[in-house]
Structure formats: C-alpha cells, structure tokens
Image (cartoon, rainbow, N blue to C red):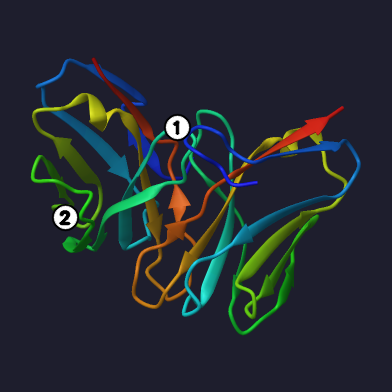
Amino acid sequence: DTGVSQNPRHKITKRGQNVTFRCDPISEHNRLYWYRQTLGQGPEFLTYFQNEAQLEKSRLLSDRFSAERPKGSFSTLEIQRTEQGDSAMYLCASSPGELRSPLHFGNGTRLTVT
Amino acid sequence: GESVGLHLPTLSVQEGDNSIINCAYSNSASDYFIWYKQESGKGPQFIIDIRSNMDKRQGQRVTVLLNKTVKHLSLQIAATQPGDSAVYFCAENLPNTPLVFGKGTRLSVIA
C-alpha cells in the first residue's frame, strides 16, 4: 500500500497526558499537512510542511501542539497536557507540492481524551 | 439545508438514479476546487478537482460543475450505487493557502 499511513488508528488517553501521532506520507510527496476533524464537521487545517520546513500554522494550533518533520519524510504531531476538547480525528495528508494538486489523506488517528 | 452542529444535510437517492450534491464556497478569489468522499472511519478520498478557468469537468461517473458568478460548485454522480453512500465535502483553495473544507453532505443510497 503506497498511500498515506497514520499510526495509531485509535488512541484513548486521560486528560493531562501527552500523546504523539505519526504520519508516513506518500514517498515522493514533499508537502505534508495535518488537519483535525470533529464529528459532523469538515477537516480543519492545523499545519503543513514543505520538506522539513514548517511553513504555516493555524491559530487552532495552540502552544500544547507541536509538529515535526525532521528529515522531510515522516511527521509527528504531539499534544501535551491533553484536554477533553482535543478529542477528534487527526488527519494527515500529503501532496507533490505542485500548484493545484489534490491532497491525499490517510485514515486518521482518532483521539479520545477521558 | 444548512448543517448545524452534528446535523449534516442529507441526500437520499434510489440506486441507479443520478445524484447532485451542491456546495456554496466562500471566497471569490479561490481558484481550485476539490470534491472528497469520506466513508465512516476513513480519511477523505479524492474524487475530482476543477480549476477556476473551467466550468465543467468529467470523470468516471462523476461531473463537477463550477459557477463562479454565484460561487457554487456541484458534484453529479451518475447511476448512483450503494458504494457511493458516504459524506461528500467540497474544498476550495486560494493561491498559497491551505485547502479549506466546506460542510459535508451525507449521501444515502436506497437499494
């Protein structure tokens, strides 16, 4: 399978704990995106990388959130001191980086904060 | 109608009929549009895209229409099948900005 891969698929954590998610993009894609989706809503942009450089961050991305893409390949999204409001599906997507090319999404990591 | 909170607009169609899903986009400067299909427990799946210099584009069983005058996008699915049941999202792209998703529409196909 050469699509976008996300791990874990599901994560249940207690409020206040830290969690980290991983995304492996399509190998030849140099852009990588993180989105968040809550029930009944469309995905909302969080941040994106061009190779290893983080080029944009949404105001939704509070100080408790940090994303990295150290070698321009896989990416991690960490949430510190989780809150119940962080419960959502976290989606990763990649694209070739050409103008006007579609994003290809993984199947997400569903986070539940209890 | 408009979705509020957890309530998505829903379209129910008979198997074999054609479906039309509508989307009003927000920014007249958007120049690229994409339709995605999302099944339960999965990420959005690319269906078809269109650039603002076009008003129609066809794929396999799908057609996207773009009306820039009224900022309206539609997705037509021919001969709708049970496997088409999903939530459909339109998304718009301004130059040099990330993709912005609209509110979804749930398509239910009645066998």
Q: Provide the chain ID for the residue under circle 2.
A: A
Q: Provide the chain ID for the residue under circle 1.
A: A
**Residue located beneath label 1 in the image:** A39
Q: In the displayed structure, does residue A42 sit left or right of residue B76?
A: left
Q: Is residue B31 above or below residue B100?
A: below
Q: Amino acid at mark 1?
A: Leu
Which of the two discs, 2 and 1, sits closer to the camera? 1
**Residue located beneath label 2 in the image:** A71
- The kind of secondary structure element at disc 1 is loop
Q: Residue at the location (25% across, 47% down)?
A: A74
**Quadrant, the C terminus of chain B:** top right
Q: In the displayed structure, does residue B81 sit left or right of residue B105?
A: right
Q: Residue at the location (23% across, 63% down)?
A: A51
Q: Are marks 2 and 1 in contact (CB under 8 Å)?
A: no
Q: Residue at the location (34% across, 70% down)?
A: B97
Q: Nearer the viewer, residue B71 or A73?
A: B71
Horizontal and vertical percent position of residue A106: 43, 42
Q: Amino acid at mark 2?
A: Lys
Horizontal and vertical percent position of residue A76: 20, 42
- The kind of secondary structure element at disc 2 is loop
Which quarter of the picture shows residue B82?
top right
Horizontal and vertical percent position of residue B90: 57, 56
Q: Is residue A112 above or below residue A53?
A: above
Horizontal and vertical percent position of residue B81: 82, 38
What is the CA distance from the residue labelled 2 to the residue labelled 1? 33 Å
Q: Residue at the location (48% across, 40% down)?
A: B43
Q: Nearer the viewer, residue B101 or B2?
A: B2
* Callout 2 and callout 1 share a chain: yes
